[in-house]
Structures are given as structure tokens and as C-alpha cells.
Amino acid sequence: MQRISVPEADRLIGVKHPVLSHGFVVLVDYMGNDGAIVQAARVSYGQGTKSVRDDRGLIRYLMRHHHTTPFEMVEYKFLVRLPIYVARQMVRHRTVSLNEYSARYSVVPDEYEVPAPEEVRHQSTRNRQGRGDVLAPELVERFRADLDRISRDAYAAYTQALDSGVARETARLVLPVAFYTQWYWKINLHNLFHFLSLRLDPHAQEEIRLYAAELAKLARVVCPVAFEAFEEFQIQGLRLSGREQRAVRALLDGKTPAEACAASGLALTREDGRPLSTGEGVEFLEKLERIRTLE
Ligand SMILES: Cc1cc2nc3c(=O)[nH]c(=O)nc-3n(C[C@H](O)[C@H](O)[C@H](O)COP(=O)(O)OP(=O)(O)OC[C@H]3O[C@@H](n4cnc5c(N)ncnc54)[C@H](O)[C@@H]3O)c2cc1C
């Protein structure tokens, strides 16, 4: 029996793909491919299905019906270098095996993230966790200069502490979350899809989205058909609640979106009549807009 290999993916192994100013993603190894997903599924469905569904059709069926275990047959090992504030978000994904650079054992390199000017923006008024409108250039530059100065001072304090004999595990306390760390990150395809559905989403912070996009780009080379199905059913797919389905029925009956929302209990205004900027009604209109502007 031959080990499964994907020549395009083999050529990517060990290649650094830059993310942010000092970060990168490297595909270290992988196991399986689209064929491994199909092979695992056929164990449960039997050879008989082969004539009815081709491989692409079978993978799309598995994705549509949340038959997830065949996707677990594919594994990826990545090396990721990322700022600590992004690592804190990424580490929340518990179905990953990871091993991080030890700042107790090794000296932290003098590398920290200063966001590009266009990434330093106003607090969003709609999303309490996000950034929104453009900020005045002088405010952007003041923030970036402060971050740069504080990071340089912190690193100077760190090296001074190391030079004076303070243990590495203690000296690192002075380093802010803009500094970089790195880790091996091993995940199966099912869990990677879950991670990507959360971290490619526009609600996720821009920086982790950049890492997610790079991971997806590399992982897709191993399993292009599974990724196509993932994008179609999970990324582009829309879920409709019971109220939203009633609103769609009202639209089909010729009602306007506002009337459809009112008829199905999806609020668009507060009690005093002022428009809401968030909530189920607003999100329903966003879904309609996504459909309307579909390419
Ligand atoms: C836009 C965004 C904003 C966020 N904001 C915050 C925030 O403000 N504060 C914050 O603390 N976190 C925040 N998070 C992190 C979020 O709450 C999750 O911890 C993170 O997205 C990992 O999701 P997960 O648990 O589904 O994934 P994983 O940890 O990879 O788990 C995958 C799945 O395994 C199952 N699972 C794993 N462990 C358990 C368990 N112990 N019990 C039950 N089921 C389990 C669940 O079904 C889970 O969906 C945010 C995430 C996103 C995407």
C-alpha cells in the first residue's frame, strides 16, 4: 500500500508563507487527501455507492449532511509564527494539538507587531468587538509611535533583566502581547473547517482572519474537492431561523422586507421607533442583501 501524496502539496512543504510583519505559516506535513475522505466514507456506505455517486458528489453529500468523520481522516501539521494577541485567540480552539516555543527555555526574539496605518481605526459603533471608521491620520500615527516606543522599551527592559541574571520565565513578563510566538499546530480537516468557519468570518479580528486565510490556502491544495464543498455549504451557506423562514414566506407573498420582518417578529426598531443597528431583524436584512448581491 502506497502512502497518499499530493505532488502540489509536497512542493509546499517547508515553504514560509508570510502573514503580518514577522509572522508566517508553513505546511510541515499532511496525511490523506480527498481520496482518503471518500475511502473512509465508502467503508460505511459500501462499494455499491460508487456507481451512484462520484467522489465529488459523495464529498458534497457528506458535507451537506454533516457526516463529519470521513473528514477527520485528513490531518495537517503547520508551523505558525504569530503575535501573542492572535495566539490568544487561536489557542481557544481546543481540538488542535499544539506545541509552543518556550519563553522559559529560549530568549524571545525582538519582533513585535505594529499594525499598518489602515488597520488602526475607530472603535466600531455596530460591533462592540470590532473596528470601524477611518481614524484621523495624526491619531493613527500617535498610536503606532506609542506602540513602537513601548515595545522597544519593553524589549530593552527584557534584555537588561536577562543580562542581570533574571530567569527567562520571569523576564518575559515585561513583554506586551504585540510580541511574536510560534508553535506547531496539528489539526484534522473536520476541526480545521470548524476553525475556518469561525475565523474567516467577518466578525473575527482581521489579524486572525489573515492566518485563517493562509492556513486555508495551504490546506486546500491537499483536499481541493472537500474545500469546494466546505465553501459552498458552510462559508456561503445561510441558516434561517424559524422566524426568518416565516419572513421569507412573507416576501414570497409579495411583502416588503420591512413588512416581512414585522409579520414574523423580527424587530427593526426600538420601542421608541428608533432604528436598531444590531439584532435578529438587522441580521436577516443582511442575509437578504448577501443573496441579492450574490455573484
Ligand atoms: C468572533 C469571535 C469572538 C469571540 N469572542 C470571545 C470573547 O469575547 N471571549 C471569549 O472568551 N471567547 C471568545 N471567542 C472564542 C469562542 O468563544 C470559542 O472559544 C472559540 O471560537 C473556539 O470555538 P469552539 O469552542 O467551537 O472550538 P473548539 O475549541 O475547537 O471546539 C470544537 C467543538 O468541540 C466541542 N467542544 C470542545 N470542547 C468542549 C467542551 N469543553 N464542552 C463542550 N463542547 C466542547 C464544541 O462542539 C466545539 O464547538 C470568540 C470567537 C469568535 C469567533
Image (cartoon, helix red, strand yellow):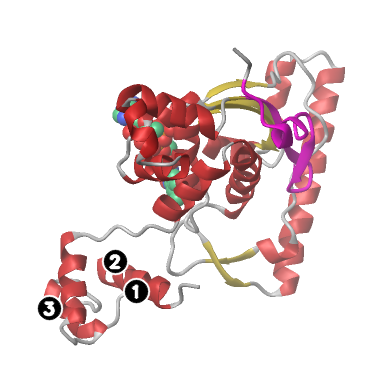
Closest to the observer, 28 or 243 = 28
- Disc 1 designates what residue? 288
Does residue 286 appear to the left or right of 142 in the view shown? left
**Outermost front residue:** 51
**Which amino acid type is marked by label 2?**
Gly
Quarter where residue 267 is shown: bottom left
Percent from the top left, x then y, of residue 144? 75, 57
Name the residue that disc number 2 marks. Answer: 279
Q: Is residue 65 visible?
A: yes
Q: Disc 1 marks which amino acid?
A: Leu
Q: Position of residue 173 (x, y in %)?
A: 67, 27
- Ligand 1: give its quadrant: top left
Q: CA distance from mark 1 to mark 3?
A: 16 Å
What residue is at 78 percent from the left and 29 percent from the top? Answer: 14
Q: Position of residue 238 (x, y in %)?
A: 34, 60
Q: CA distance from mark 1 to mark 2?
A: 15 Å
Residue span colored magenta: 4-30
Left or right: residue 137 compared with residue 99:
right
Towards the viewer: 39 or 223: 39
Is residue 273 in view from this perspective?
Answer: no
Do the residues bearing badges 3 and 2 touch, measured as CB atoms within 8 Å?
Answer: no
Dot label at residue 92: none
- Give the residue number, with chain letter if any, for mark 3: 263
Q: In the displayed structure, would residue 217 be above or below residue 164?
A: below
Q: Callout 2: helix, strand or loop?
A: loop
Closer mark to the observer between disc 1 and disc 2: 1
- Label 1 crowd (10 A; few <14 / some 14-19 / many >=20): some
| Dot placed on the residue nearer the N-terminal end, 1 or 3 | 3
The kind of residue on which mark 3 rests is Ala
| Label 3 crowd bin: few (<14), some (14–19), many (20+), radius 10 Å | some
Q: Is residue 273 above or below residue 14?
A: below
User: Residue 189: percent from the left, percent from the top?
Assistant: 50, 33
